[in-house]
Amino acid sequence: MSKYEELHKLKEEMEKDESLPLKKGATKLVFGVGNTEAKIVCVGEGPGRTEDQRGIPFVGQAGKLLDKLFPLAGLERKEVFITNIVHHRPPENRDPLPEEILAYGKYLDKIIEIIKPKVILTLGRFSMAKFLPNVFISSVHGKRYEVLVGGRSTTIIPMYHPAASLRNGNVLAQEKLDFKNLKNILAELSKPKENIIEAEQTSLI
């Protein structure tokens, strides 16, 4: 089964899951969108009004800003897979509650397990807290962290949520710098690792 097929099957499973706490008040499940073979997965917070209507993450104003930020890192939207920490819209766009994040978390874990990204970009403090608990986004944004995710070493790069950048010019300026720096981080990660055996043989000469 391909990753696309696995994700489609998982989406169908989510749509049938009546236990998901935000399902009743939502219009559509906002599962995720993008390249199923992506090396980068972006994880936001939760769907807004436009996302709830269309069933696609980051298609409102915050999504339009995200589309402008990607090129600063040398990326296009079609290269990444985008999802959220919760996949139904919280009422009145409120913050997701801990028990809601937990309920949707098993599906997010499965999405990540299927795609097996090398890099996870967290957009906002709620998705950041899943991978980097007990830190402040103001202290860690734009930095690179190696974290075990599902038993695999994964690079986590926390970013401000684009919605926060729309509200605050200073945050937007920092986010632009973070995405420019992301280009350097991705270039570093793409460099081939040295052959350890060859290095050991060289040191014996």
Image (cartoon, grey):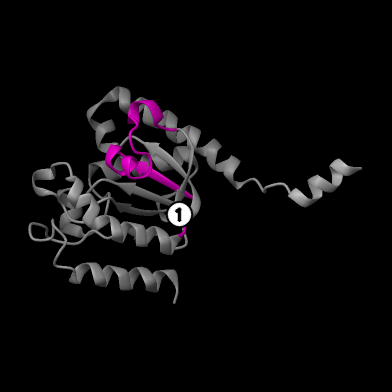
Image coordinates of residue 145 in percent, x first then y, are: 48, 38
SS at badge 1: helix
Is 122 placed above or below 180 here?
below
Q: What residue type is disc 1 on?
A: Glu
Quadrant, the N terminus: bottom left
Q: Magenta includes 120?
A: yes
**Is 101 colored magenta in this rendering?**
no
Estimate the x, y position of residue 90 in percent, counting from the top left.
13, 49
Q: Residue at x 28, y 24 (%)?
A: 169
Residue sitting farthest toward the bottom: 1
Using the rendered image of the protein, determine whether residue 167 is visible from the camera's viewpoint. yes
| Residue for badge 1 | 79
Q: Quadrant of residue 134?
A: top left
> How many neighbours does mark 1 have within 10 angstroms: few (below 14), some (14-19), or many (20 or more)?
some
Q: Is residue 104 left or right of residue 178?
A: left
User: Which portion, as a residue range, is magenta?
Assistant: 116-142
Q: Is residue 17 above or below residue 135?
A: below
Q: Quadrant of residue 69?
A: top left
